[in-house]
Image (cartoon, grey):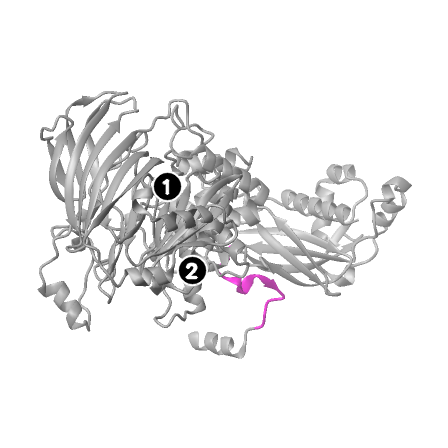
């Protein structure tokens, strides 16, 4: 009977509204389509042979390749790094190139860098003498690349122009499609102290006189040239990260002989740099899928750090199909590892950390690496590299292919808070996860920060909850409410270039992650979402996707029109606010009201064609047991009566309002007088004809005593004061506060 009554009431109410429209109103002017459900065709780039309308790479998609052969020397005494690199640039595009662009990221720290001048600065009311001296009295440190030479493959000088963090290589002749160009760069730079000077890489010096080197962005690297941006040669201002090409690396790194070193790629000379015992332990680790195995114990690391070798050792690594290279080196390292089963293939999870990281790091780091590889592989693709390394650094959280630097340090006595532990687990999961986004699904970080940080933060959330079901992720829809409901003048749409985004963290990390969580759990459902997300990840492995490729693939692989979601969540700073405006109890009657009588008279033919009528009223005194309904039910066949129950005892018309700009599903929970509950979800499309309010009729044989919108805070609703009926009574404090406002 519920189904019959709901249909009958809805039909009657809609028909009455239609018949009641007046035609004497003045004709309004036309307008452009501003419906929240209009397609994104006016925003997304036109599909072409390189990037299809489905979101997949097209048959004409091309991608450059850059190979590096490098000899690197770490000078621990002077904290300098020296490099000699040979670069082979493969022009796989269909374009003729007149020059190449090389990134010189270390120049962001150079004395003549424009980065400090691009920051608004005001005088502080107090400042320490040390900070004042460092900022205003001391000469700036001579950071930045010192380019010793740039040469052709034949050894002759190659014309080049340096523009701050970019260097243009002026080609002797245009590089045609299918050709390659080989050249070399010799360079050095002073390494920054990452604790005192800041920075994404550098070194930390310890009181015992030893250093922990976490080295990245350390060599001149080719910028991306693609069929969307051309050359991605935007300056590095210190925040938005990198767009890089894939290639093969052959790297030799010379460091003090007593250092332990790990890096991107496969170690080529294990016998020359590891002891027999260390190799034996590593073989054991390759078979240990449950617990980490120590290759260097804490006792051994403590003994080594008390000495200093004056000899050197060269570590040799090769890596194929990677977009970058980084390494870590110190004599202080404890080293442990364990095996991870990725769909039948063994991958190594590895950690390097000084004793200052224990006991926290030996307990969690490598296990978190293993868990991250397993969980990300389930939602994307099987992790393709042979290892993933977590390196402890006091202040850093940064990612590179196969290796990342992570914070999370206990107190000097080894104690630590739950917050420090959670922070360490979170940053390791996040940075290891970056192997997938953008180290493999290689989006343009300089342009669209959310494509790597946001997508990665979303999968990170699922991985953290797998590691600890009670983990506080900070990336759920409820966690973004305060940000989204804040001052609109201090917000940026997600679809903003990273360097000018306001409130960078929530914008690039939390809001995209929360949006994807909302898509998966509330809008699409895990089955549809996971297939589409996996399709996107696998389509764009080792390629350069754009936002349009992501949006289109998610729709293409799920058969869901999500343009309304992308437009609202990613292109605006609108917020969710859906509430209950009115709940009106209705009653069945055989007495039409005066307005309905007029309609029945005016449209007699129409009403006659409808057969017996049942009416609704909001006046309880007019309620009765309508004879027409009784006759209708009595006239049904025995077969039809099987699906019909008694007429509903309670009928409610609920008006939902939407003060917020975002359209979202309406999740409604009804609580009955007997304590039972029922939920119903209306898709976002319920708002397609009216962006301000919609009505629904609910029928029941039990009295509804409470109605709640979004009871589990799934939609990032910024104001829940209008989410319940009956409306909650204000507390005495709230009443006083509202009174004082007046």
Q: Going 34% across and 65% down the picture, which residue do you hit?
A: 356
Q: Is residue 690 left or right of 123 when viewed as pictured?
A: right
> For the residues marked 1 and 2, what is the alpha-carbon distance in whole angstroms?
26 Å
The answer, for residue 6, to whether it is visible in the render is yes
Q: State the mark number for residue 439.
A: 1
Q: What residue is drawn where x is 37% and y is 61%?
A: 298
Q: Earlier in the sequence, mark 1 or mark 2?
A: 2
Residue 66 lies left or right of residue 387; in this view the side is left
Q: Which residues are magenta?
A: 715-729
**Crowdedness near tag 1: few (<14), some (14–19) or many (≥20) residues, C-alpha within 10 Å:** many
Residue 633, compared with residue 718, is above or below; it is above
Residue 374 picture location, percent across and down: 50, 46
Please tell me whether mark 1 sits on a helix, a strand or a loop.
loop
Circle number at residue 362: 2
Please check the rendered image and state whether residue 726 is part of the magenta-colored stretch, yes or no: yes
Q: Are marks 1 and 2 in contact (CB under 8 Å)?
A: no
Crowd around label 2: few <14 · some 14–19 · many ≥20 (10 Å): many
Looking at the image, which residue is at 20% across and 51% down? 311
Direction from residue 718 to residue 413 in the image, left or right: left
């Amino acid at each position: 009977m519920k189904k019959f009554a709901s249909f009958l009431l809805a039909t009657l109410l809609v028909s009455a509204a239609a018949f009641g429209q007046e035609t004497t109103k003045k004709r309004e002017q036309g307008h452009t389509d501003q419906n929240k459900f209009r397609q994104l065709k006016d925003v997304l780039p036109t599909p072409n042979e390189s990037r299809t309308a489905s979101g997949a790479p097209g048959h004409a998609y091309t991608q450059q390749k850059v190979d590096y052969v490098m000899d690197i020397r770490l000078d621990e005494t002077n904290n300098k790094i020296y490099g000699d690199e040979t670069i082979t640039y493969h022009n796989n595009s269909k374009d003729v190139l007149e020059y190449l662009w090389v990134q010189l990221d270390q120049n962001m720290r150079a004395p003549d860098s424009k980065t400090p001048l691009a920051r608004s600065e005001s005088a502080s009311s107090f400042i320490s003498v040390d900070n004042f001296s460092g900022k205003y009295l001391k000469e700036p440190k001579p950071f930045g690349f010192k380019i010793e030479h740039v040469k052709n493959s034949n050894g002759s000088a190659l014309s080049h122009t340096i523009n701050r963090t970019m260097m243009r290589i002026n080609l002797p002749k245009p590089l045609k499609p299918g050709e390659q160009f080989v050249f070399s760069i010799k360079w050095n730079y002073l390494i920054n102290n990452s604790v005192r000077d800041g920075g994404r890489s550098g070194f930390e010096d310890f009181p015992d006189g030893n250093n922990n080197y976490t080295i990245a962005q350390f060599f001149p690297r080719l910028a991306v040239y693609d069929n969307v941006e051309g050359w991605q040669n935007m300056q590095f201002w210190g925040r938005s990260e990198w767009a890089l090409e894939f290639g093969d690396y052959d790297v030799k790194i010379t460091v003090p002989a007593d250092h332990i070193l790990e890096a991107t790629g496969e170690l080529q000379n294990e016998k020359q740099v590891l002891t027999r015992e260390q190799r034996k332990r590593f073989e054991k680790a390759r078979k240990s899928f449950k617990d980490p195995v120590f290759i260097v114990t804490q006792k051994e690391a403590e003994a080594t750090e008390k000495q200093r070798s004056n000899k050197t050792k060269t570590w040799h690594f090769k890596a194929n199909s990677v977009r970058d290279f980084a390494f870590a080196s110190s004599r202080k390292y404890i080293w442990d590892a364990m095996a991870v089963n990725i769909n039948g293939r063994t991958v190594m999870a590895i950690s390097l950390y000084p004793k200052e990281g224990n006991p926290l790091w030996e307990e969690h780091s490598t296990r978190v690496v293993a868990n991250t590889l397993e969980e990300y592989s389930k939602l994307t693709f099987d992790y393709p590299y042979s290892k993933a390394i977590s390196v402890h650094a006091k202040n850093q959280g940064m990612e590179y292919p196969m290796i990342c630097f992570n914070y999370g340090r206990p107190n000097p006595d080894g104690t630590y808070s739950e917050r420090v532990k959670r922070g360490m687990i979170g940053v390791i999961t996040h940075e290891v996860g970056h192997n997938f986004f953008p180290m493999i699904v290689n989006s343009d970080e300089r342009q669209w920060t959310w494509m790597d940080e946001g997508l990665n933060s979303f999968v990170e959330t699922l991985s953290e909850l797998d590691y600890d079901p009670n983990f506080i992720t900070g990336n759920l829809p409820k966690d973004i409410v305060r940000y989204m409901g804040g001052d609109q003048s201090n917000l940026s749409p997600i679809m903003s270039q990273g360097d000018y985004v306001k409130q960078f963290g929530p914008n690039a990390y939390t809001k995209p992650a929360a949006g994807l969580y909302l898509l998966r759990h509330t809008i699409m459902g895990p089955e549809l979402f996971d297939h589409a997300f996996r399709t996107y990840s696998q389509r764009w492995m080792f390629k350069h996707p754009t936002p349009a490729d992501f949006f289109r693939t998610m729709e293409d692989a799920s058969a869901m029109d999500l343009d309304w979601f992308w437009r609202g969540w990613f292109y605006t700073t609108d917020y969710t606010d859906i509430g209950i405006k009115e709940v009106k109890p209705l009653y069945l009657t055989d007495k039409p009201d005066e307005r309905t009588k007029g309609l029945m008279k005016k449209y007699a033919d129409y009403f006659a064609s409808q057969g017996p009528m049942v009416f609704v009223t909001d006046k309880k005194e007019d309620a009765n047991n309508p004879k027409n309904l009784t006759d209708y039910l009595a006239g049904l066949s025995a077969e039809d009566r099987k699906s019909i129950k008694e007429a509903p005892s309670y009928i409610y018309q609920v008006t939902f309002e939407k003060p917020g700009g975002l359209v979202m599903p309406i999740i409604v929970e009804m609580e009955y007088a007997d304590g039972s509950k029922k939920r119903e979800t209306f898709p976002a499309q319920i708002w397609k004809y009216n962006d301000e309010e919609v009505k629904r009729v609910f029928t029941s044989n039990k009295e509804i005593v409470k109605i709640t919108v979004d009871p589990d805070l799934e939609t990032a609703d910024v104001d829940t004061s209008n989410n319940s009926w009956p409306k909650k009574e204000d507390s005495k404090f709230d009443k006083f506060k509202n009174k004082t406002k007046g």
